[in-house]
Amino acid sequence: MNILQALFFPPEQPGGVSSMVPYIGERFRKIGWEMELFSIPKRIRNKGQEEIAFATFDWRAFAGHPVVDKYIQTLKDYVWWSRLRLKGKYDLIHAHHPVAALAMKQIYPDTPLLMTVHSSYERELILNGRIPADGPEHRFLTSLYGELEHRTDRLLTVSRSFAAYMGAYMKRPETVGVIPNGYDERRFKPISHENEVTQLVTVCRLVPAKGLDLLLKACAELRKRDRKFVLHIIGDGPIRPELEKLAQDLGIYDETIFYGYMLHPEEMMPFFDVFVLPSRAEAFGSVFAEAALCLLALVGTDVGGIAEQIENGSNGLLVPPEDPAALAEALDQLIIDPHYRYELARAAMNKAKKTYSLNRVINELKKIYVAMGPAEAPGPSQ
């Protein structure tokens, strides 16, 4: 079978999609399937001129708003780039971003299209203060779920909570399938170590949605309790200067290390003790599974896909969102009790190996690909 994996960001970008899809392609190619990865380079700007029309709503009613205009132009650019670069025919297209899915259906209207929705752009924009809730940009972006339902042959997402979120904007929400992300265990190499001072780490884009202001406030409380720790912040983003200033104002700058962007943070993660990320929303939270495979104890907020990965007190600790005091208490438990920390980390690793294995994803996708592809496609056991 010849399948096109249509990404938005180039596969070298960090994140759950990019860290998973190339490995999916590699596994399928080993069994004789053709698997091509496609994405749009960041340098492509304002090239597309082809008209865009949706079947379920008129996007022009939202025109004139910057987020909407940029989204439509990006879609036009993706169509332009795809027509320029894609010359082959495919048995199936698996898109991993709404722009990619809508562009591919415009170019290949007769090719079966599978779409996995990995995250919510509108929720990120709202939490990051870029658009208002229930405003025109928000309504435009949520209308796209109905358009995707209409235009694709099958929709998947990465967590039950996000399937429910999407379903509120669809006619048949029960048709959305759920396949959590999967990871190649060979990428993660836990290392036996004993840190005299507890090493906390977080890996994310530095934006308000990730709740790092709450993490810094929680760490300030730990310092008041005279707990010994170092906080490692891996990632970059627009609020890094604000976070650095907040760390200074809270008196924990000496305990905090800002690394900036790192392509392969999993190479460093095994040397830390606790992974913590108090996100305000998260469709899945790939980095929690990756941290678990590095044998780190997990602390996260009780939101979205994080709450589906962490069973509180069993394989990690969950805290309410927007609650730095509860976050400090959870971190305190893990700092003062290394044995408890290790037991949680071990349980998290075991669950990640079982639930988020790349083999599981491959097997589930293979069944879907065969069902959607041509009749002569190889069966799931091949």
Image (cartoon, grey):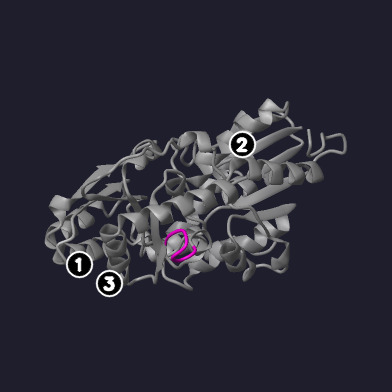
Looking at the image, which residue is at 46% across and 64% down? 123
Comparing labels 3 and 2, the label whose residue is closer to the camera: 3
Quadrant holding the C terminus: top right
* Front one among 344 and 291: 344
Q: Tell me, yes or no, whether the highlighted magenta stretch contains residue 313.
A: yes
The residue identified by callout 3 is 325
Which is more N-terminal, label 2 or label 3? 2
Task: Tell me the kind of residue under disc 1.
Answer: Glu
Query: What's the magenta region?
Result: 311-316
> Which of the numbered marks, if any, corresponds to residue 264?
none
Q: Which residue is mark 1?
A: 221
Q: Which mark is residue 24?
A: 2
Vertical placement of 89 versus 329: above or below? above
**Which residue is nearer to you in this view: 243 or 333?**
333
State which tag comes first along the sequence, 1 or 3: 1
Q: Amino acid at mark 3?
A: Ala
